[in-house]
Amino acid sequence: MAFFLTAAGLMMLFEGFPFFCFPNQYKEWLSKVKELPNSTLRTIGLVVMILGLGLVYVGKSLTVSS
C-alpha cells in the first residue's frame, strides 16, 4: 500500500507541475495536442506507459536488492 501511495503522490506531483509553473504555455500546448491524429496520441501514450512500467520495474528491483 505504501508503494501505491508513493506512486500516486509522485504522479500527482508531476501532473500538477506544468499547471502551476507554466499555465499559459500549457494551454497553448493543449490546443496543439487537439490537432494531432489519434494514432499519434495512442503511440505517445503507449511509449509513456512502457517507459513508466520500466521505471517501476527498475525501482522495484532496486528496492528488493537493497
Image: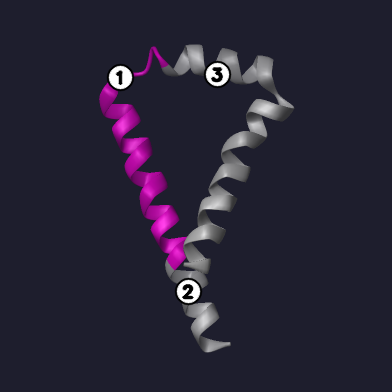
Could you tell me which secondary element the residue under label 1 belongs to? loop
Q: Residue 60 — which label?
A: 2
In the picture provided, is 27 more to the left or to the right than 55? right
Instruction: Give the distance between the C-alpha atoms of the residues marked 3 and 1, in whole angstroms.
Output: 15 Å
The amino acid type, in three-letter code, at marker 1 is: Pro
* Segment tinted magenta in the rendering: 34-56
Quadrant housing residue 39: top left
Quarter of the image containing the C terminus? bottom right
The residue under the point 60% across, 20% down is 26
In the picture provided, is 2 more to the left or to the right than 33? right
Q: Nearer the viewer, mark 3 or mark 2?
A: 2
- Give the main secondary structure of the magenta stretch: helix
Instruction: Give the distance between the C-alpha atoms of the residues marked 1 and 2, in whole angstroms.
Output: 35 Å
What residue is shown with label 3? 29
Q: Is residue 34 above or below residue 64?
A: above
The amino acid type, in three-letter code, at marker 2 is: Lys
Q: Is residue 17 above or below residue 6?
A: above
Q: Residue 47 — which label?
A: none
The amino acid type, in three-letter code, at marker 3 is: Trp
Q: Foreground: 57 or 6?
A: 6
Tell me whether circle 3 and circle 2 mark residues in contact (CB < 8 Å).
Answer: no
The residue under the point 43% across, 54% down is 51
Q: Is residue 62 above or below residue 15?
A: below
